[in-house]
Amino acid sequence: MRLLITISLVFFMIFSLIPIVGADELSDAYVKEYTFLKAQKEELARRLQKEEEQQTREIELSEKKVKNLQDVHVALSKQLKQKEVDIDKAHEKLLDTTSNKEIINSVIVQAKMSLEKFGIIVDDTAPAKVKTMASAFQDSAVLYQNLSAMHVEEGQFYLLDGTTTRGEIVKVGNIAAYGISAKQSGALAPAGNGEYKLWNQPGSDDDARALYGREMPEMLDIFIYENRDKDAEYQAEKTAGDILEAGGVIGFVIMGLGIAGLLLILSRVLFLLRAGSRVKRITGIVYEKLESGKGSEAYEAIRDFKGSTARVIRATLRNITSDREHIEDIITENILNENRALDRFANFILVIAAVAPLLGLLGTVTGMINTFDIITVHGTGDPKLLSGGISEALVTTMFGLIVAIPLLLLGNLANGWAENIKDSMEQSALHVVNLYEKSSNAK
């Protein structure tokens, strides 16, 4: 800014003196001013160079500082991440310590509740929790060893008729027992309130006496119980009525369809037996008459025979003198007339075989719906409440398969049998025509 002001003043002075001074003086003034400006320019150039060098040095120093700061930032970031990891580990360790403390307290409380009924006292108020827990484990190990051993003691148990008797009780640990008395012996089951009763399944009396004599049979008829506080119900054998009742309404429907299908199968089998009865005898008589030249007697010989084959052969013999094309049409027509009778009930049987599994699936769905309804109302505490819906779900599926499999098998076998009868009728009728033409040509 000063340079510009100076230059302006110089030019102002020069131009103000132009009218006064002469050409020489003006030239000298220009020379002086040029020299002055050149010196100013060189000075400015030197100052500019110094400024550039200074700025370059300052930029280099700034870049070094920035790089150092970046290195410091990276190092601090790594330290921060490591500190965060350390904090997380410390937090997890704190949580584990708290959780372990809660687990230890819970184990001690459970040990106290479980061992008190066996006369073992666990002090859950002691400050040394780990020591208390270790002592409880030691006491539990000793108790487990004592309870897992087999021993004999005198006691009382209920017989199958409800009366009580005294005898020897062979305890297999704390999970099973056998009773031996002068009246009855065998495996024992809980009767409630810590008492025993004889289990109603036979075959365990020999095992009871063998164990009492310190002998170990290869196979044991044993009743394993969890505790003796709850009465174990006797196992009753299921009858067919119980199983059918477990299937519910859909089970009755499936079994009704199964009975209807079996009746249809039986009716169809009886009809096919009548339709194909005495085929060999009928064809043998007709063949013999035709081969011996007594074709006119063939019809009378089979007049009294019953069945589809007999009817087709008689229709063939009635029109035996017609041309072959007409006879074949008659044979085809009579076989088609017999089709309806031969295929009687076939579609109904296969429909029942197809519907039965679907009804079983429907029973499965309704049974599971009932089960979930019971769970919604009563929860899952009592398995007996859930058994009804589960039984319906499984039993209906079983009924559907029991009905479908034999009906599908027998229905297809009957269809194959009917087709064989149709083929034999056609073959026999055409053979009769061929024999008649042969005997006619021979004449």
Image (spheres, rainbow, N blue to C red):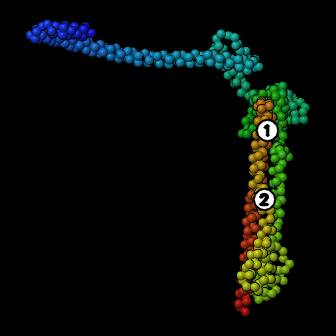
> Residue at the spot x=33%, y=14% of the render?
62
Image position of 196 with respect to 67: above or below: below
Question: Crowding near pointer 2: few (<14 within 10 Å), some, many (20+)?
Answer: many
Which residue is outermost to the front? 19
> Residue at the spot x=79%, y=68% of the render?
340
Q: Say which mark, if any, is on residue 370.
A: 1
Q: Nearer the viewer, residue 172 or 254?
A: 254
Please report whichever mark, 1 or 2, sits nearer to the chain's N-terminal start.
Answer: 2
> Residue at the spot x=78%, y=42% of the render?
366
- Where's residue 95, x and y in %? 59, 17
The image quadrant that residue 222 belongs to is: top right
Question: Crowding near pointer 1: few (<14 within 10 Å), some, many (20+)?
Answer: some
Q: Say which mark, if any, is on residue 119.
A: none
**Amino acid bearing label 2:** Ile
Q: Secondary structure at mark 2?
A: helix
Q: Quadrant of the N terminus?
A: top left
Tell me how far mark 1 sits from mark 2, CA to CA.
31 Å
The image quadrant that residue 20 belongs to is: top left
> Residue at the spot x=84%, y=28% of the render?
192
Which residue is outermost to the bottom? 443
The image quadrant that residue 49 belongs to is: top left
Image position of 140 with respect to 159: above or below: above
Image position of 371 with respect to 250: above or below: above
Q: Secondary structure at mark 1?
A: helix
- Where's residue 364, x and y in %? 76, 44
- Where's residue 432, x and y in %? 74, 81
Q: Is residue 334 visible?
A: yes
Image position of 434 with respect to 155: above or below: below
Number of marks in the image?
2
Q: Say which mark, if any, is on residue 349.
A: 2
Which residue is outermost to the left? 24
